[in-house]
Image: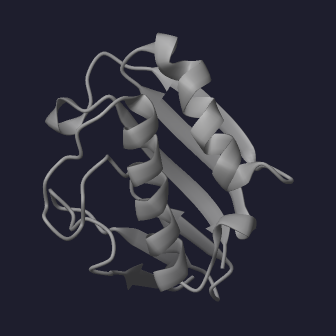
């Protein structure tokens, strides 16, 4: 099975020893690293409520998917990590704008802590 690393400057650079995304097999699946609300142009975290942060995260994922030859329409599984499950409904309002029609399977969990102490991180698996 082959593995191709996907990199783009339209999503935040990795902040550790990992790839932004990886395409496997003969290009059938694309796995993204978890994305946090970081502006890829400045390298700074965006400020604002959970909806502002969720939008930035989803734009980062969209950029990674496109760099890997995929799109939001081809996402089959999403995992959402929230610092506070009380943000779930507000996050869903933004999420629905990106995945409203035929949404992928999804898990959402509350976690004790995320990288750079952000409020949200999202990762996904898509068909390439």
Q: Nearer the viewer, residue 120 or 106?
A: 120
Residue situated in front as seen by the camera: 22 or 48: 48
Instruction: Indicate the quadrant where residue 113 lies.
Output: top left
Determine the residue positioned at 62% across, 85% down: 27
Q: Quadrant of residue 83?
A: top left
| Between 2 and 74, the one nearer to me in the picture | 74
Q: How is the image coloured?
A: one colour
Q: Position of residue 53 (x, y in %)?
A: 37, 41
Q: Is residue 113 above or below residue 6?
A: above
Residue 33 position in % (x across, y down): 39, 57
Nearest the eye: 105 or 42: 42
Residue 94 appears left or right of 58? right
In the picture, which quadrant includes the C terminus? bottom right
Disc tally is 0
Residue at position x 49%, y 54% from top?
A: 58
Which quarter of the rendered picture does the N terminus lie within? bottom right
Residue 10, above or below 35: below
Kindly indicate the quadrant of the structure image that contains residue 39: bottom left
Residue that protrudes farthest toward the top in the picture: 86
Image coordinates of residue 103 in percent, x first then y, are 79, 49
Where 32 falls versus 23 (above or below)? above
> On screen, 110 above or below 59?
above
At 21% from the left and 68% from the top, the residue drawn is 13
Residue 97 percent across, percent down from the top left: 67, 49
């Amino acid at each position: 099975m082959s593995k191709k690393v996907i990199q783009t400057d339209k999503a935040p650079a990795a902040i550790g020893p990992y790839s932004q995304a990886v395409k496997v097999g003969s290009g059938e699946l694309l796995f993204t690293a978890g994305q946090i609300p970081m502006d890829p142009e400045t390298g700074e975290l965006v400020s604002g409520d959970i909806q502002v942060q969720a939008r930035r995260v989803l734009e980062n994922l969209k950029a990674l998917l496109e760099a890997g030859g995929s799109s939001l329409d081809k996402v089959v599984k999403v995992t959402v990590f929230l610092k506070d499950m009380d943000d779930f409904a507000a996050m869903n309002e933004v999420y629905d704008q990106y995945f409203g029609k035929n949404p992928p399977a999804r898990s959402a969990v509350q976690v004790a802590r995320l990288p750079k102490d952000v409020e949200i991180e999202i990762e996904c698996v898509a068909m390439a």
